[in-house]
Amino acid sequence: MHTEKYDVAIIGTGIGGLVCGCYLAKAGLKTIIIEKNKTVGGYCSSFTRGKYSFDACVHAFSSYREQGVLYRTIKDLGINQIKIGRKNPSDIIVTPDFKIKIYNDLPKAIKEFQSIFPKEKKSIEDFFTYIVKSSLEAFIKSRRMTFRQILDKHFTDSRLKTILSLILLGLVGTDAHELSSVVGCLIYKEFIFDGGYYPQNCIQDFPDSLLEKYKEFHGEIITAKTAKKMTVNDHAVEKVILNDHQEVSAKYFVSACDAKYTLETLIGENALTEIQKIKIKKLKPSLSAFLVYLGLEDSFAIGDDYRSNIWVIQNYDYDGAMQEIANMNNDFLAITSPYAKSEMKKSIGKTLCLSTITLYKDPAYWRDDHKAQLADKLVARAEKIIPGLSKSIKKRVIASPHTLYKWTFNYQGAAYGWASTVSQFCDPDISQKTSIPNLYLSGHWANLSSGVTSVINCGFNVANLILQKEKK
Ligand SMILES: Cc1cc2nc3c(=O)[nH]c(=O)nc-3n(C[C@H](O)[C@H](O)[C@H](O)COP(=O)(O)OP(=O)(O)OC[C@H]3O[C@@H](n4cnc5c(N)ncnc54)[C@H](O)[C@@H]3O)c2cc1C
């Protein structure tokens, strides 16, 4: 029983919770993190089945250039345990007619696109240079525009616009017709033009190294217990009550998990402002994901291309591709291989992961036959570019949107927190600060975009808000 009072209690060990905890503990605040799973990392984690090691969701990191957020955080926290390499090309786009490789070298990446779309030569150069060289302030000038409007302003070739929109759908789970142009440009800048980073072993290396550092800073953690309720008195959270009735008291609380669950269930509607009650019901989550993890025969040849993230785009008609997603008949998928990326190949089996963006539907929809149907479709689709794939499958594990929900409690299995639409992104009513002065939100539900880089930023910002209050 934790009867002592902490300075800060954090719920959730996604990267948004772990980074926040590290900065607070480093500054000397008595910090405790509560995690419902046995392992840390949330979506940024790995698991094994027999000799096969799979990355649950996150398949690559971004922003590890010298001024990048990930690089700065690892240096700031003094994390020496992790070795991060970069794959080149980071991403490969495969369509029925061509293959585009995104190299870690802007002029080369531009040339690659120009060779496929010669009529868009100048627009490609202008657009990619604008994305890479512009600051956040420059992107914010177009904040009322959707990403699709930005693409329409630059390009005429609808195939190019579909490709650029679908990749973003895969990276943020929001339709380009609604997606904030600020988020779209930032994601391209960070994930595509500074992406493709991978740790030595597997994705789990990163949350594990954050946890190790957090403990070195004397941070405490409770795992395998769920936060069920927060008590609010006199407009302040007093304690969090866990599933075994254990109570944790603190001066500040950080919810690094789903904001809807936090505000509606942990806190309860009585403690919310009228505007928050309305907003939390109206805000739209991002789309979810469906993943098929494949363990393959030892003799199966996984080529060098699979060190990159492969985006398979079948349909050049963007609205048609979105309609297929609405009909649960996806043709768009990503192929990644933890095996091909890992440097520890000798000790693990050969693996591939096929993933696609999908609707949540409801738990009843994801019966075994519906899961098998979509999984079979993705395997058949992947087999067109990887001949002999289906015959080499020794193990198949499926994660549906409902599985993602069960892993993390993310509302509707949302892959990327709130949808990053023009109207929702940076909404001040649901943000890092809540209407309760000692309660903060960290992670991809704080409305400041998603992905590991964004949630690192968010965790760092929330830690700073608390440290400022503590005059540290
Ligand atoms: C399929 C997929 C692929 C992705 N690929 C990438 C990628 O390649 N690169 C990238 O940067 N991003 C990627 N993302 C996005 C990225 O994973 C997320 O945006 C980011 O990891 C979210 O981190 P978070 O800290 O907000 O929380 P989450 O990862 O959602 O973690 C929340 C944590 O809180 C815990 N928790 C929740 N409720 C409670 C409770 N009541 N009590 C105790 N614990 C609780 C959960 O168990 C979980 O550990 C991907 C996402 C998906 C779904």
Image (spheres, rainbow, N blue to C red):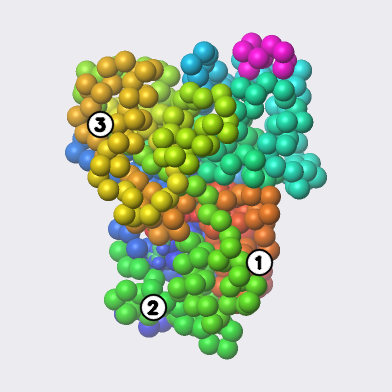
Query: Nearer the N terminus, badge 3 or badge 1?
Result: 3
Q: Position of residue 322 (x, y in %)?
A: 53, 36
Q: Quadrant of residue 382?
A: top left
What is the x, y in percent for residue 163?
Answer: 58, 27
Q: Residue 241: which numbered mark, if any? A: 2
Of the numbered discs 1 and 2, the one sitting upstream in the chain is: 2
User: What range is drawn magenta here?
Assistant: 113-121
Q: Which mark is residue 295?
A: 3
Residue 277 located left or right of residue 202: right
Image quadrant where residue 167 sits: top right
Q: Using the numbered discs, state the Cα–Cα distance from disc 1 to disc 2 in whole angstroms.
A: 26 Å
Q: Residue at x 68, y 21 (%)?
A: 157
**Is 437 on the left or on the right of 10, as rendered?**
right
Residue at 48% across, 61% down: 258
Circle 1 residue = 429
Relative image position of residue 138 (x, y in whole percent): 79, 41
> Which residue sits at x=72%, y=17%?
120
